[in-house]
Amino acid sequence: STRVHWVPLVNAGELRGVVAVFHDISALKRVEKIRRDFVANVSHELRTPVTVIKGYAETLLTGALADDPQRSQHFLTIIDNHASRLSTLIADLLALSELESGDNLLKLESVRLESAVRQSLQLLELKAEEKALVMRCEGLGQVLPVFADRKRLDQVLMNLLDNAIKYSKIGGTVTVSAREVEDQVQIEVRDTGIGIPESDLPRLFERFYRVDEARSRERGGTGLGLSIVKHIVQAHGGSVAVTSTLGEGATFSFTLPTAERLP
Ligand code: ADP
């Protein structure tokens, strides 16, 4: 859309004509809409757990606690789950706003992928065991170290691996691999899970975008993980990509610069 400004052309005190200036405000409007949608999404995401917590807490306060200890225990578990959800959501929002503010400096250092990946895998061991998954590593020891902020890299690995596990079927396989591509290292997280419909792939890295809202929420997702991944990778000068076959699995990959030329 456009906005028109009429500017008078005056010469020696006399009006000679007018010039129409057209401003293209569609880009501005788009940014505004993204911001509005984001605020609406955040409010919605925050309201759901708060409503649940308040509802169950009120029920407990009106006497359920004394009458039926078993039911009370159940209500408290629900309250606890939704409080955890809130806390994850707030942590993700903070991470995202920190990344977007742009004034977060990366503490770049030479990082060996193998040790970073092994550490993330260890933290997710229980979740993987619960679904009887096979977790494999390929080629991690053979690539050059990457030039990365270790804490941010951990965040990327944890988000991708957590998703791979979350959207895996029982007994599936998750593979982390790495290879050198020109002067970068490409890291791949591949799963044999439920996969993603092709039409959803282009929007997957957007904030709050989910293929199936109910499914994501039920599995504890906030819809922010992949946008955080994209931000971090891009801040390192790398890029993210995804391919998938519905029902057969998904492959997420990202690149990072190698730390080859470091002293
Ligand atoms: P969420 O917190 O919902 O997992 P993400 O931003 O991490 O949010 O991911 C966005 C959406 O992408 C998810 O809701 C899910 O539908 C889809 N997704 C992400 N990773 C995978 C995967 N490994 N397999 C299938 N779907 C995935």
Image: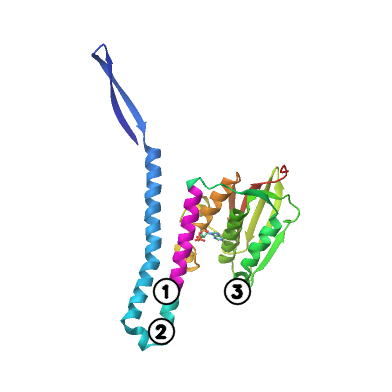
Looking at the image, is 72 positioned above or below residue 170? below
**150 horizontally vs 209: left or right:** right
Query: Around disc 2, counting alpha carbons within 10 Å, would you say few (fewer than 14), some (14 to 19), or many (20 or more)?
Result: some
In which image quadrant can residue 6 be found?
top left
Q: Distance between the residues labelled 3 and 2?
A: 27 Å
Choose the circle earlier in sequence order: 3 or 1: 1
* Comparing labels 3 and 1, the label whose residue is closer to the camera: 1
> Quick check: 107 left or right of 20?
right
Residue at point 61%, 67% (across, down)? 124
Q: Does the residue labelled 2 lie within 8 Å of ligand 1?
A: no
State the residue in front, 228 or 177: 228
The picture places residue 123, in percent across and down from the top left corner, at 62, 66
Residue at the extreme right: 142
Q: Which amino acid does label 2 sit on?
A: Arg
Disc 3 designates what residue? 130
Q: Position of residue 84 (x, y in %)?
A: 47, 68
View extreme (left): residue: 14
Residue assigned mark 2: 71
Between discs 3 and 2, the one toward the N terminus: 2
* Depicted 194 relative to depicted 97: above or below: below
Question: Few, some or many C-alpha atoms within 10 Å of disc 1 (few <14, some 14-19, many ≥20)?
Answer: many
Q: Looking at the image, which is closer to me, 98 or 5? A: 98
* Tag 1: amino acid: Ile
Q: Residue at 37% of width from left, 60% of height from top?
A: 44
Q: Which span of residues is magenta-colored?
A: 79-100
The alpha-carbon separation of the residues under discs 3 and 1 comes to 23 Å
**Prevailing secondary structure of the magenta residues:** helix
Query: Which residue in the protein does label 1 denote?
Result: 79
Tag 3: residue type? Glu
- For the C terminus, the quadrant is top right
**Circles 3 and 1 in contact, beta carbons < 8 Å:** no
